Image: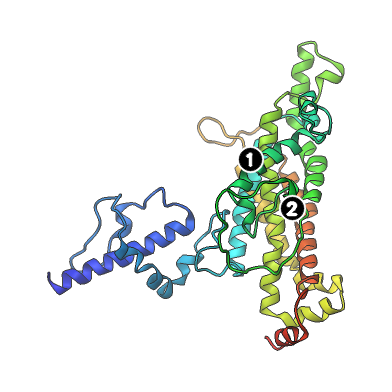
């Protein structure tokens, strides 16, 4: 084989390895890139013509080389299902930011889905279903739904991941069926879980607001059918569908809020001396000042509002926005509600998690270890 031909093939395999790495990071391994992606600018202009060319050990042997020469591949937009087994820095603020931005999409789309159903308040009240009482379940329909869902997820070791927190007490969940993954030590040991607060504000403040239109339309429909009084309002009977989406929203918000631990750990490692005095002599207000970035929050709120106004816009069959006679568009959800969710609930609760995490960041460390951290700049 000619040396130039072998060099060309080496270049192709390097490029394929790079594409494989990028695909893994973005979670698209089930959808191979197009053949054109693999084209290499060489004199012979070699390119792959089979879009399903199998990757061989020769490609995998080059993955680490690719990482060393182009780390940007590992900072490509990650999926919200973070892979902590990859050789990337999970505390990179750019990586954390990308994850949080992707979670915005998950939360917004799930809220839009929930808005199509009426409030169905029965699913949030305890002891409302005789069927559950017969099973000796004393919680609400949603709590039961979470318990059943999280039981399955726990068996698949979801809650061994450092960014996943169940709403069900971990003592009531089964052990994973699979052996545990050996995750790198990312966060300082802690027991912070604010899911109870998330459940409360979501079911009492958010759901009633985003379902207002669907609830009103249901009441009008029932009145036209002669149904009035208590039976005309709020309940469309879609308990399973509503709870299924509620679980998705709650888990996404939980992940978003608890990501505050990663933010705090990243900032602490960058400048530990700034935080340690306010941890040793607990000063939550000073810690809050250190982590608060008003300009970042303002940008986030603007982005969330714009995303929602785009994602939730009602379109006609031709893909054009539906507008009334005054030229005002129509949306599937209250756009301001999603902004308020972030401004009044998600951001404040995330900062509570960040501060609480920092207050316990030195737990278990010796004075010598703390002194070493103080020397870090």
Q: Residue at x 70, y 35 (%)?
A: 243
What is the number of callouts on the image?
A: 2
Res. 194 image quadrant: bottom right
- Viewer-side residue, 256 vs 296: 256
Res. 55 image quadrant: bottom left
Q: Residues within 10 Å of mark 2 (few under 14, many from 20)?
A: many
Residue 309 shows up from this direction: no
Query: Helix, strand, or loop for circle 2?
Result: helix
Residue 158 location (% of width, % of height): 61, 51
Label 1: which residue? 312
Q: Residue at x 71, y 75 (%)?
A: 268
Q: Residue furthest left?
A: 1
Q: Residue at x 48, y 66 (%)?
A: 74
- Viewer-side residue, 209 vs 368: 368
Residue 142 - label: none
Label 2: which residue? 342
Where is 115 relative to 226, above or below? below
Q: Quadrant of the C terminus?
A: bottom right
């Amino acid at each position: 084989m000619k040396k130039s031909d072998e060099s060309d093939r080496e270049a192709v395999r390097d490029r394929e390895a790079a594409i494989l790495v990028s695909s893994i990071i973005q979670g698209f391994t089930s959808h191979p890139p197009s053949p054109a992606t693999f084209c290499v600018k060489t004199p012979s202009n070699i390119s792959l013509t089979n879009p399903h060319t199998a990757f061989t050990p020769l490609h995998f042997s080059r993955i680490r080389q690719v990482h060393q020469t182009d780390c940007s591949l590992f900072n490509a937009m990650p999926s919200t299902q973070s892979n902590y087994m990859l050789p990337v820095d999970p505390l990179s603020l750019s990586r954390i930011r990308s994850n949080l931005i992707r979670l915005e999409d998950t939360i917004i789309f799930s809220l839009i889905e929930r808005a199509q159903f009426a409030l169905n308040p029965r699913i949030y009240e305890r002891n409302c279903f005789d069927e559950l009482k017969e099973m000796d379940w004393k919680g609400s329909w949603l709590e039961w739904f979470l318990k059943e869902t999280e039981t399955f997820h726990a068996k698949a070791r979801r809650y061994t991941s450092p960014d996943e927190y169940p709403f069900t007490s971990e003592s009531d969940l089964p052990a994973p069926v699979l052996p545990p993954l050996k995750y790198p030590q990312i966060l300082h040991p802690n027991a912070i879980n604010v899911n109870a607060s998330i459940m409360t504000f979501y079911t009492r403040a958010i759901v009633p607001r985003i379902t207002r239109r669907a609830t009103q339309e249901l009441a009008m429909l029932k009145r036209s059918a002669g149904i009035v009084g208590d039976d005309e309002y709020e309940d469309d009977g879609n308990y399973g569908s509503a709870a299924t989406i509620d679980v998705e929203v709650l888990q996404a918000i939980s992940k978003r809020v608890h990501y505050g631990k990663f933010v705090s750990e990243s900032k602490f490692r960058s400048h530990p001396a700034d935080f340690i005095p306010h941890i040793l002599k607990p000063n939550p207000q000073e810690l809050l000042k250190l982590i608060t970035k008003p300009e970042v929050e303002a940008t986030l709120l603007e982005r969330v509002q714009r995303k929602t106004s785009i994602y939730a816009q009602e379109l006609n069959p031709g893909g054009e926005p539906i507008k009334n006679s005054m030229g005002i568009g129509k949306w599937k959800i209250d756009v301001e509600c999603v902004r308020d969710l972030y401004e009044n609930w998600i951001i404040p609760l995330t900062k509570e998690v960040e501060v609480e995490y920092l207050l316990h960041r030195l737990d278990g460390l010796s004075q010598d270890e703390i002194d070493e951290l103080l020397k870090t700049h």
